[in-house]
Amino acid sequence: MRRILLDANVIIKLHELGVWTEVLLHVQKRGWRLLVAETVVSEVDYFRTEEGHVPIDLTQDFQKELLDRFDMGAESLRKFRSGFDPLYAPELDPGETECLAFLVENPESTLLCTSDSAAFRTLGLLNRSENGISLEEFLQQIGLGRRLPYQYTEKFRVRYTHEGQRDFLQRRGFR
Amino acid sequence: MSLAERLKWAREAMGLRLQDVFRRTEIGISTLSDFENAVREPRVWQLKRLAELYHRPLSFFLEEGPIPHQPVICWRERPSSPQVEEIEAQFLQLAEQYHRLEVLCQERQTEVSLPDWDIPPHEMTYPLVQRLAQQFRSQSQLDSCPACELLWVLEEVYQVKVFHLPFEPTGTAACAWGESFGPAILLNARNVRWRRNFDLAHELFHLLTWKTFRGKLPQPGNKPSEQEERFATCFASNLLLPPELLQQTLEEEQRAGGFTIPAIYRIAQRFDVSMEAVIWQIRFLYRMSDDWASRCIQQCKYLKDFWENRASDSPPRLPRRYEALAQKALQQGLISIGVFAQYMDITRQEALIWAEHLAEAQASSLEEFSTGETNSSGCKCDHQIT
């Protein structure tokens, strides 16, 4: 079973695009699971529309088991971060760090869907480029493909993953 | 130092009790106590809330070993507790973030640094302070209106990190010298520009004489003496109101109609300082009495509302260079969108818009280069070097 970790930016964008509910149903149909880190839940408070700000509430989706939530302890985070050079590795926010720490502990069939250059770069640095997926690719795979801004494209993911891979090969960003 | 010890240390450094933390994070008191006594391990979302409240990066709590030496903050007048702990934590956090951006973007310039006037305190005199002001002015090429250029020169040439935060009392400002981030100044965003200009010059004196008055390893809590404060005021006056320029301007005013309150206002406007600053500098240059200065200031106060029609501005909370570095770091994938939001003090949604715009701009510039089309100058893009 495939597990997709969603970061805050992607959740906000899917709400903005008006396809959030559709995505949940399409993923369920395929027997995949969508996972959201507890830290990320607190980071997605609203999305913007032409009428103004609309609050994002994932409670119902968790109750209907369309989404799974997980959280990590501080020790797991410490372990995850301990391999990086704090000066030169990309600086991630707690939500992304929690997602990546989870992914490193559970790499089998787990993908991180993000639009964050620093997250893709870190995946490259961890030599786990195959565990990253762009929003463009994800939507295409569940049959909801559409044209998206550059930041959500496969091209964007490849570009920053390569940057991280280059650092990995040059051993930059490690302790 | 363990995570539990660091949590307790950070809370106490902010002057907060467990119930204060509970009120602001909604994490129960017994849970907080368990964290600090290493009975229970915090979850990441809980640690994030605590890190935000304590103005520390998450990494601070995950490090091992002793806590690094905390930079001393030199206040003109220390605000009261617990407000001061909050402001100090914000100030140091901003300075550390600025330093972090410089390191990530590899833009730490160290060729030009602030002069280091390691003068023994007993040798410091007013004539020497006046000479030091003149020396700094000429070395930094501050011309006819030093106040108009000082902020830019400090930020861009000497890499001093200058922040503006609102706090009380308004009559105070602060500076610090961090082992990592170097010299930094905190100004009060609630003050008008000409007042902030004077505060900037005043704090600059403390930085230039850091070794003289604070020693090489300063201990927290060492407040500047009254004498040091008077030297700092003398330095600021002489830096922003150079005696030779002020005398020349005064002579022009005398010829035009005499020395009046409107004349003081015009001089203050020309040098972008307060009327009080002009009066005190005239008092020292012409050896007038304190009584004369006080009377002038009183008269100015009555007429201030009428004469003081200069337009002030809201200072930028963050330095321009800091913002540029944050954008560069985001664009290069060196910081995540969430970190960008925190560094720029904006919401994640706002940061997301920034990220989309920066990515689009990058994509379009990449396309321009990849098309390989040449313009009339033979350049493979629309941008010509002029």
Image (cartoon, rainbow, N blue to C red):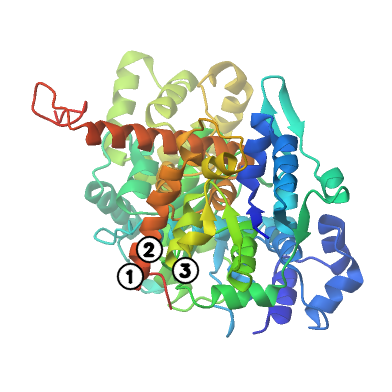
- Of the residues shown, which amino acid type is indicated by label 1? Leu
Q: Which residue is drawn at 13% across and 23% down?
A: B375
SS at badge 2 = helix
Rendered location of residue A163, percent (x, y): 36, 57
Total numbered circles? 3
Query: Element under label 1?
Result: helix
Q: Position of residue B50 (x, y in %)?
A: 73, 63
Read off the chain for label 3. A
Residue receiving disc 1: A169
Q: Can residue A99 be seen in this view?
A: yes
Q: Do labels 1 and 3 share a chain?
A: yes
User: Residue A74 is drawn in which quadrant?
Assistant: bottom right
> Could you say which quadrant of the image residue B240 lies in?
top left
Whole-percent x and y of residue B292?
52, 36
The amino acid marked with disc number 3 is Leu
The reply to whether discs 2 and 1 touch (Cβ–Cβ < 8 Å) is yes
**Callout 1 touching callout 3 (CB < 8 Å):** no
Q: Give the residue at mark 2.
A: A165
In what quadrant of the picture does the C terminus of chain B appear?
A: top left
Q: Subunit of mark 1?
A: A
Decide which of A12, B301 is in the foreground and name it: A12
Residue neighbourhood size for the residue with mark 3, other residues' Cα within 10 Å, grouped as few (<14), some (14–19), many (≥20)? many
Seen as rendered, the residue at the extreme front is: A30
